[in-house]
Amino acid sequence: MSAQAPAAELTARFGVSAGRRRKDRIARAIILAATILALIPLVLIIYYLLEKGLGAWSSSFFTTDPTGNTFFKNSAIGGVKSAILGSIEMVALASAIAIPLGVGVALWLVEYGRASWFAKVVRFFVDVLTGVPSIVFGLFIYIVLVIGTGSTFAGYKGSLALSLLMLPVVIRSAEVILLLVPGGLRESALALGAPRWKVIFRIVLPTALPGMVTGVLLAVARAAGETAPLLFTAGSPKKTTTDLGAFMNSLPVQIYNDINSATPSVVSRAWGAALALVTLILLLNLAARLISRRSRLV
Amino acid sequence: MTPTRRTTEVADVDPDRSSELERTDAGSPADGGEELAKRQRLISVPEAAGATTVARPGFGVKLEQLRAFYGDAEQVKGIDLEFRANEVTAIIGPSGCGKSTMVRCINRMHEEIPGARAEGRVLLDGMDIYDPSVDVVAVRRAVGMVFQKPNPFPTMSIYDNVAAGLRLSGRRGGDLDAKVETALRGAGLWSEVSDRLSQPGAGLSGGQQQRLCIARSLAVEPEVILMDEPCSALDPVATLKIEELIDELKQRVTIVIVTHNMQQAARVADRTAFMLDGQLVEIGPTQEIFTKPTDSRTEEYVTGKFG
């Protein structure tokens, strides 16, 4: 470009045309609108949870079991202690089953199975399982462990249904994260004379940990919020129990039962329970993030 | 150089082993893996031997009709080649000629790629590392590798990165601190990082990271180090440091370096091999390869007519 080039010529060549300016403004407006539109229900959910749920919270809400006395206006309906403890217990057991198993499957797929036909079959079925509605897992456990054994509901059966639900989510998310670990890290560890299992435990897993925590939490949160797999596997007793072999209450089932009630105070308890459930998942999220951050060297 | 270097423990190692380049059948293949792992590798060479710089000899490596495949595609097509102990041998040749593949066969990293396999023999100090009885882990402990891209373990500190080799290969015994310091000094990195060993290895500059990777390899005390274009991601100053390092390292290990940079080959290598289309064209003293090669294709390549 010569220094003498007229300014108009330069503007014509390097300036942004009015048409492009307009298109840019419209496109920006559209994606901003989409963002705001998506935020509306999220904000409303949180608003209603707080608005309706906080009113139900009291000290006895967390420390008493539901009484079942819902017919009279002044009777004490009780809190959700059994539901909170039941949910925590069942989700913990389900996680203890599904997380190690799922991470193991993902490790096999990434580190050993790779592109073998069996790995492809496993991936296909995991994908199918991801799409299976949660009530089907409940039905499966109902048929096999409740009807099949001629017995009745139990906390551990609910846990098994939840773990089936979690398994494909854990496998898929862990696999994606493990694939992100650079192959060069595995190679350089192997080239140091490390056995493969040590490469996996000392290099691959620690590198993948922060990402895996996110995926695993998603699975845990999903399990904690499921009603359908628990309806006819764990039941909805009122009393608190720590026996996983007995009927076990849970927050989602409690919410499901309460929201159908004709008594306003019981409906309000459902909102309180919903807020408790969301808070529980939020706390879990924060805790896991703190742990994974601390374990990572920075 | 390295004040903590051990120079004792002469065991059953033949003092003039390093000059026995022709020997190809030492050690029975049956217990080869264990022999490799257990081998006493520190010997002190008497002044009288006239080789005072050889504190710890590397292994010679000999390839016999080495062929390497990716699925059905033959990438290395029958190579016979010898890497002499305690020498730097550079491998040059155009992209895709099989340099890296060949080098990766020397510590059996080639087979880590799905569908890849190798045929022929690779004799490490006379012992065939492709013998079915050989433990691949033991081979990799004896033959270290430095990759093109510096890749310190991201979750580990500088210290842990160097110690990783020892921990990962199950050789935790002895004074770990001293071994880490020795390795870092050996890689010329000690003075730059000694005050921040607990900081993440990924926080170093590219050149420092690559020297950290070299220190990591050195810590396990290999006899051979393979370098696959170790400077291609580095700036000229960092490259120079690595090259000076290579010159020092060859007193302790045998070095095979793949490079695209012919000046680099000329600067660091005792001997240079030229490869083309999966085959070895010629190998000779670096000086000769660059000034009076016997093969016209070598001459065309080193004078920049192709590649």
Image (cartoon, grey):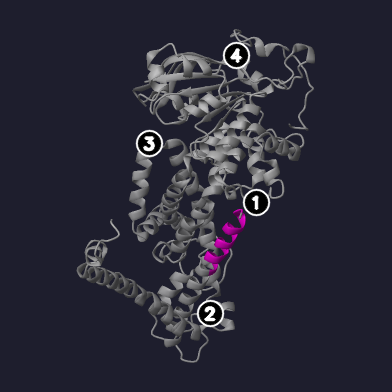
Q: Give the letter of the chain under mark 3.
A: A
Give the residue type at disc 2: Gly
In the structure shown, which secondary structural element does the residue marked by tag 1 occupy? loop
Label 1: which residue? Answer: B199
Left or right: A145 as drawn, with respect to B106 = left
Q: Is residue A198 magenta?
A: no
- Residue drawn at (41%, 17%), measured in percent from left and top? B298
Who is closer to the viewer here, A208 or B10?
B10
Query: Any mark on residue B30, and which?
Result: 4
Q: Which residues are magenta?
A: A283-297
Instruction: Where is residue A262? Give x, y as percent.
Output: 38, 85
Can you tell which of label 1 and label 4 is closer to the viewer?
A: 1
Residue identifier under label 3: A115
Q: Amino acid at mark 3?
A: Ala
**Mark 2 vs mark 1: in front:** 1
Q: Nearer the viewer, mark 2 or mark 3?
A: 3
Instruction: Mark 2 or mark 3: name the one nearer the start of the chain.
Output: 2
Q: Chain of mark 4?
A: B
Residues marked 2 and 1, same chain: no
